[in-house]
Image: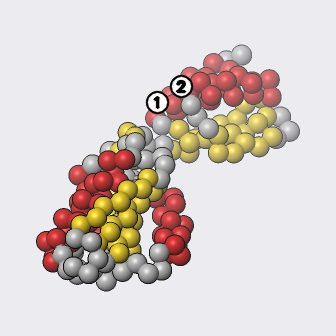
Amino acid sequence: MRTIANSYFAQYEVKKSVFIAHLSPMSEFESVREKLKAQHPKAAHIVWAYRYLNEFDQIVENGSDDGEPKGTSAQPILNVLRGLELVNAAVLIVRYFGGVKLGTGGLVRAYGTAAKSVLGEAELLVYLAKELFCFSCKYTFVQRAEYVLNKLGVAFEDRSFEAEEVAWRVLVTQEQKEELLRFLEEITLR
């Protein structure tokens, strides 16, 4: 599976209809959708589709044709996302009608092409499942813990300074978790 870290934009035109495609991380979907509605009040349609992993690591998909004939717009976008095995990402496409009807086949091709064009701009990253990992260490090991976390590329979600120790909450891959467990074993033996 793959995912993205940033937002991307591309434009596609066919028979005077303009398709403005936006690709964003799932965490930004609602804000991007609201922004597009505000920026493009005269657009004929704002079609969207997304795929994300829920808390059970199941893929959740959804889309909206926003008034386009059923199955002609969100479905082709979803098919592009599926084809690239993209998760935790959303594609939103603003359409300005150019006066020439595209027909159902033309709409399917246009929305699919617009989605492919914005994904062609994107830097796709390998998706790595992460889990919340909590640990604590004595104050004497805080600098070493920070060093290990930085070395592994782990950003901590939260840490709290208790009376005797520091409690950490971090998001880690399985590999990072194993390295942290080795570090914790090493400092507890001292």
| Residue at 35% in and 60% down | 11
Secondary structure under the numbered disc 2 in the rendered image: helix
> Alpha carbon of mark 2 to alpha carbon of mark 1: how far?
6 Å
Locate the N terminus and report the quarter of the image it occupies. Answer: top left
Label 2 sits on residue: 179
Q: Residues within 10 Å of mark 2 (few under 14, many from 20)?
A: some
Foreground pick, 24 / 27: 24
| Residue at 76% in and 36% down | 166
| Residue at 47% in and 53% down | 7
Q: Quadrant of residue 73?
A: bottom left
CB of mark 2 within 8 Å of CB of mark 1?
Answer: yes
Locate the C terminus and report the quarter of the image it occupies. Answer: top right
Q: Quadrant of residue 180?
A: top right
Q: Residues within 10 Å of mark 1 (few under 14, many from 20)?
A: few
Is residue 71 among the parts visible in the rendering?
yes
> Residue placed farthest to the top in the image?
190
Label 1 sits on residue: 175
Residue 86 badge: none
| Residue at 70% in and 35% down | 136
Tell me where residue 40 appears, x and y as whole percent. 47, 75
